[in-house]
């Protein structure tokens, strides 16, 4: 069951997902009981290769690697030869000579982690590639939900917001469906893809979506940086129509629903300030669970092992480059 790389969610079998979730539970028990470091990756090296800015994912991976006793190197893209015109391939050849064991990649170009994986014997982990995939975010989301619902089959998760540009929506919906969770999308018509699997209901009206009966409301960050045109009149209007307002939070509390968000939060856009103090908000749980999930992934992968079936991965990437296709 060992793999060399973690590039996407679609290629994972349910048994692999369950294994990673179970391992995450074990790792979380360790570091919540004062065992802050174990020698699982002692002598191994982890390279952080982030072409896009990141706080949560970057720091979570770094903490996870250090808790497994790995050596961590942060590759400073802003001050590297990349700014002088060096290609990604040339960069990887240089890094390969350093004999690193794991490369954690975030890049704005969909499919680039897969390209890197084909050129190195190191284990490559996709930490987000454009609007394509974010597999460890999906795993930590599933782990967070499973903590509240040990058997999540039949539960309903309503994903609200900028579905069109969201790698989180793609990865998380794919993984949740593999676990038997029902998923629906809600957002402005301009931000919900026209072509989604028939198994995912598509709503543009908040009240209709809530009538669907979700157990979890998952809010996505409105990603202004990925929108080349204006998809809605204003952030104030977006908050009024699709955000969790004070009145909607009261309804959510009465129904006992959980709230999730991958961060960073745009207060006053996706949600009101009061959500952060809501007793069933799982946003801080997601941050904490990111460490144990990433520990499990690093411990699971096998550097230098068999290369994944990149042709299949590349084909999936091409298919999903313009639409959300879990």
Image: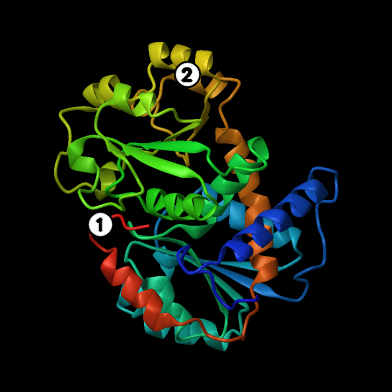
- Tell me which numbered mark, 1 or 2, is placed earlier along the sequence: 2
Q: Position of residue 181 (x, y in %)?
A: 50, 45
Label 2 environment density (alpha carbons within 10 Å; few <14, some 14–19, many ≥20):
many
Quarter residue 241 falls in: top left
Indicate whether 151 appears above or below 21.
Answer: above
Q: Secondary structure at mark 2?
A: helix
Q: How far apart in space, not on screen, are marks 1 and 2 (Cα)?
A: 30 Å
Q: Position of residue 154 (x, y in %)?
A: 53, 41
Q: Quadrant of the C terminus?
A: bottom left
- Is residue 63 in view? no
Indicate whether 106 appears above or below 101.
Answer: above
Quarter residue 106 falls in: bottom left
> Which label sits on residue 252?
2
Q: Secondary structure at mark 1?
A: loop
Q: Position of residue 203 (x, y in %)?
A: 27, 34
Front residue of this view, candidates 194 and 121: 194
- Is residue 201 in view? yes
Label 1 environment density (alpha carbons within 10 Å; few <14, some 14–19, many ≥20):
some
Front residue of this view, candidates 58 and 271: 271
Q: Say which residue label 1 marks.
A: 323
Indicate whether 179 appears above or below 287.
Answer: below
Q: Quadrant of the N terminus?
A: bottom right
Rendered residue at 65%/66% (across/down)? 298
Q: Position of residue 192 (x, y in %)?
A: 25, 43
């Amino acid at each position: 069951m060992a793999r060399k790389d973690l590039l996407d969610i679609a290629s994972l079998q349910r048994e692999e997902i369950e294994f990673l979730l179970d391992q995450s539970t074990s790792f979380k028990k360790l570091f919540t009981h004062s065992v802050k470091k174990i020698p699982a990756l002692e002598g191994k090296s982890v390279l952080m290769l982030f072409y896009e800015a990141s706080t949560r994912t970057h720091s979570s991976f770094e903490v996870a690697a250090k808790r497994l006793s790995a050596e961590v190197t942060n590759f400073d893209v802003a001050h590297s030869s990349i700014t002088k015109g060096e290609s990604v391939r040339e960069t990887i050849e240089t890094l390969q000579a350093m004999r690193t064991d794991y490369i954690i990649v975030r890049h704005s170009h969909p499919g680039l982690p897969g390209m890197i994986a084909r050129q190195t014997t190191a284990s490559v982990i996709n930490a987000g590639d454009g609007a394509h995939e974010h597999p460890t975010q999906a795993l930590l989301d599933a782990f967070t939900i499973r903590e509240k619902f040990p058997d999540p089959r039949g539960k309903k998760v309503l994903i609200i917001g900028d579905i069109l540009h969201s790698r989180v929506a793609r990865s998380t919906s794919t993984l949740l469906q593999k676990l038997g969770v029902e998923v629906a999308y809600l957002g402005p018509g301009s931000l919900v893809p026209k072509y989604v699997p028939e198994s995912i209901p598509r709503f543009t009206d908040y009240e209709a979506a809530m009538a669907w009966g979700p157990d979890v409301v998952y809010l996505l960050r409105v990603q202004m940086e990925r929108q080349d045109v204006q998809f809605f009149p204003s952030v104030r209007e977006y908050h009024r129509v699709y955000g969790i307002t004070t009145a909607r939070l009261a309804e959510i509390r009465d129904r006992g629903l959980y709230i999730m968000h991958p961060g960073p939060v745009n207060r006053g856009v996706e949600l009101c300030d009061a959500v952060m103090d809501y007793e069933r908000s799982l946003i801080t749980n997601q941050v904490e669970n990111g460490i144990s999930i990433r520990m499990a992934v690093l411990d699971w992968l096998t550097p230098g092992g068999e290369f994944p079936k990149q042709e299949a991965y590349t084909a999936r990437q091409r298919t999903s480059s313009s639409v959300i296709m879990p």
